[in-house]
Amino acid sequence: MTRMRTSLLLLGALFSAACVDDPEPVTALEETGQVSGILFFDRDNNNVFTPTAGDSVMPGVTVRVLDRGTTRVLGQAVSGANGRYEIAVPVGTHDLDVVRSSAIVAGNFVWCGAAPSVYRNEATFVPTPLKFGCVIRINVAKQAAQGASVTIAGIVTAQPGRYRAANDNLYLQDPTGGVQVFGVPASLGLLEGDSIEVTGTLATFNTQLQITSPRIAPNIRRGATVPDPVQLTTAQLSATTNPLSPNVGRLARVRRVTVGAFASGNAPINDGSGAAQVRLDGNANTTIGTARFEAGKCYDITGIVGFFNNATQLQPRGAFDVTEVSCQ
């Protein structure tokens, strides 16, 4: 009897211990945070809502948070009369998406994207500016379809007035290349070294790619550093036979070249590696002049690499681009 009682006590103790040590099932709670922001048309292109600069809110537009790299919607909201929205979503880094409304389509606005990180019980504020275009590299813009709208940014390497009397074209360069922008308002007073953003239409004029009908964003940064010219031999210059070449539209320099006779603003140049062509285009024919070059002398010449009627030409911008040097 005593032995049976002892066994029962031990068995009860074991059951009791099991009840204490075995935790109750836990249901995982998904941690959440919040994405909030203000949706607006960024007229002054500075990514900050500035009503005094003409920015305007965009009400009644669906804003969505997507699982990163997918189209799976984690949460969404409609922007209010003040352009603001709030969306509760799981913690993590997600993609923010703006659904194109009729107002966005009518204004020809685009959303350039954002990837906000959301933390537990915190609100992440995301300025949500709509723009006329999202900036791409110049070498990518050049490969777009003719007539496509593109947005590029870079440094002015040849200011309006260097070539055309109408003062309405310039050359813009970024780390991938350069391109002509045609139809620039002279009232902007753009100078070499200005950093600008341009939205316009990709077009071709006599085999040379250019951006036409440009809209220059107001966020002009004055006095940036003009990129150093790429150093080319005359053989390398003449070997540029494609409007998509990285050198076309770029600021370049040839050294110790002789200059032949001019005809219609063009003359052969040679540094001993092979012949190429220099062109005094438009106003440069006046500011430099063919008399600047003498037979038997050598020059360092800097200019924009042009591609006109399938011919590559080095186009100096002014007298400061031509330096007489020793031929040795």
Image (cartoon, helix red, strand yellow):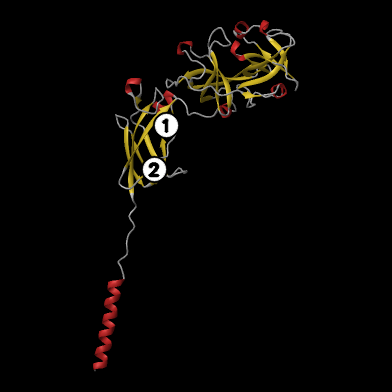
Is label 2 in a helix, a strand or a loop? strand
Is label 1 in a helix, a strand or a loop? loop
The answer to whether 286 appears left or right of 53 in the picture is right
Location of residue 296 with respect to 196 vertically, above or below: above
Query: Which image quarter is the N terminus in?
Result: bottom left
x and y percent of residue 84 in the render? 31, 33
Residue type for callout 2: Ser
Residue in the picture at 26% in, 91% down: 4
x and y percent of residue 123 in the render? 31, 41
Looking at the image, can residue 144 be seen?
no
Mark 2 sits on what residue? 117
Mark 1 sits on what residue? 100
Residue neighbourhood size for the residue with mark 2, other residues' Cα within 10 Å, grouped as few (<14), some (14–19), many (≥20): some
Residue neighbourhood size for the residue with mark 1, other residues' Cα within 10 Å, grouped as few (<14), some (14–19), many (≥20): some
The answer to whether 69 appears left or right of 3 in the picture is right
Location of residue 220 with respect to 5 vertically, above or below: above
Q: Quadrant of residue 299?
A: top right
**In front of the other: 85 or 219:** 219
Upstream in sequence: badge 2 or badge 1: 1
x and y percent of residue 65 in the render? 39, 41
Residue in the picture at 62% in, 21% down: 252
Residue type for callout 1: Arg
- Label 2 and label 1: CA atoms lie apart by 23 Å
Looking at the image, can residue 235 be seen?
yes
